[in-house]
Image (tube, rainbow, N blue to C red):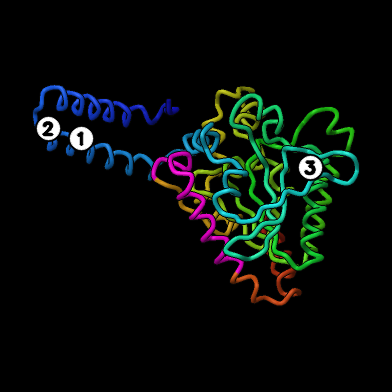
Amino acid sequence: MAIVLDFEKPIMEIQNKIDELKKMSEASGLNMESQIETFEKQAEDYKKELYSKLKPSQKLQIARHAERPKFLDYVELMCQDFIELHGDREGMDDRAIIGGLAKINNKPVMIIGIQKGKNTKENLEYNFGMPQPQGYRKALRLMKHANKFNIPVITLIDTPGAYPGIKAEETGQGAAIAVNLREMYKLSVPIIAIITGEGCSGGALGLAVADRVMMLEHAYYTVISPEGCASILWRDAAKFADAAEALKITSKDLLEFNIIDEEIAEPLGGAHTNHAETAENMKSAIIKALDDLSKLPVEKLREERYAKFRAMGRFIEN
């Protein structure tokens, strides 16, 4: 049974009426096509209006939807000949970050992403999409491998944040992310990062220093989760909707601030309603970006990448 979000309930009420009319029509033999078409158009119009005016807190719900496509779904739908590469070469293979060689449109890429599970068992395996230091070290190892062989890097990001456990801190969580930030600036190959769902804190940024940073339409990207922000500012996580509004976490806000470069459209209702269409939209954006970036000399590529991030967070001193 499909998961219905709170703000989608009016649509489901209309859909239930449509289903009732269809059953009545079949049982009675009466022709109710005109009534059914009227309700279907009403549902479609309402849905278009609703999804064009979503609040940040509503986009938050869609970004976290349990049926939203995961990293390996996108790999299956976008890539050919994916070969997963394991381990950080220091003793661990963090399953929250998965990566390997693949082809997109017959072009070799190194694709790396944060994986969430589809059920409790998988979420435990993938640590609910919260990478540990070893995951970031694995990702960097794969990026450097790609750099050596002149293969573009694609990262897909969907995380509530890096794992905050004691063991992760003891093994250098902050340092691992910081090293990734520094080393990604130095890569000589094109880097494309896409926020596909949740893009939270340094856990997301550790894979997002890229020449092109993109977001799916209903994803979010923020320095702290709205619940975390509300807990700090108002001592009340229930005020997360106010925090989501203030943090400017949506793709449209971040485009305006030049934090991201492109918004990738999702099917009406969100990526979970049509995995294949979402993947196709992402694939088209990746191919176009790779074509553009491949024309730049290496030094120009690195200069523009560095300048892009240096321009963020500008302030004026009096």
First reached walking from the N terminus: tag 2 or tag 1: 2
Position of residue 303 relative to residue 37, above or below, is below
Position of residue 281 relative to residue 164, above or below, is below
The answer to which quarter of the image holds residue 169 is top right
Local crowd size for mark 2, using a 10 Å CA cut-off: few (<14), some (14–19), many (≥20): few
What secondary structure is the magenta-colored segment mainly? Answer: helix
Q: Give the numbered dot on residue 135.
A: 3
The residues colored magenta run: 268-290
Q: Please state which of the two labelled residues, at mark 3 or mark 2, is closer to the viewer.
A: 2
Taking the image as shown, residue 170 lies to the left or right of residue 98, namely: right
First reached walking from the N terminus: tag 3 or tag 2: 2
Question: Measuring 77% from the left and 58% from the top, which residue is drawn there?
Answer: 184
Local crowd size for mark 1, using a 10 Å CA cut-off: few (<14), some (14–19), many (≥20): some
Disc 1 marks which residue? 39
Q: Can the viewer see residue 314?
A: no
The answer to which quarter of the image holds residue 299 is bottom right
Question: Measuring 60% from the left and 65% from the top, which residue is drawn there?
Answer: 106
Q: Amino acid at mark 3?
A: Gly
Q: Residue furthest front?
A: 81
Disc 2 marks which residue? 32
Q: Amino acid at mark 2?
A: Met
Cα–Cα span, label 2 and label 1: 11 Å
Q: Please state which of the two labelled residues, at mark 2 or mark 1, is closer to the viewer.
A: 2
**Helix, strand or loop at mark 1:** helix
Cα–Cα span, label 1 and label 3: 49 Å
**Helix, strand or loop at mark 2:** loop
Taking the image as shown, residue 100 lies to the left or right of residue 174, namely: left
Give the image location of residue 20, x and y in percent.
22, 24
Give the image location of residue 96, x and y in percent.
72, 38
- The quadrant of the image that shows the N terminus is top left
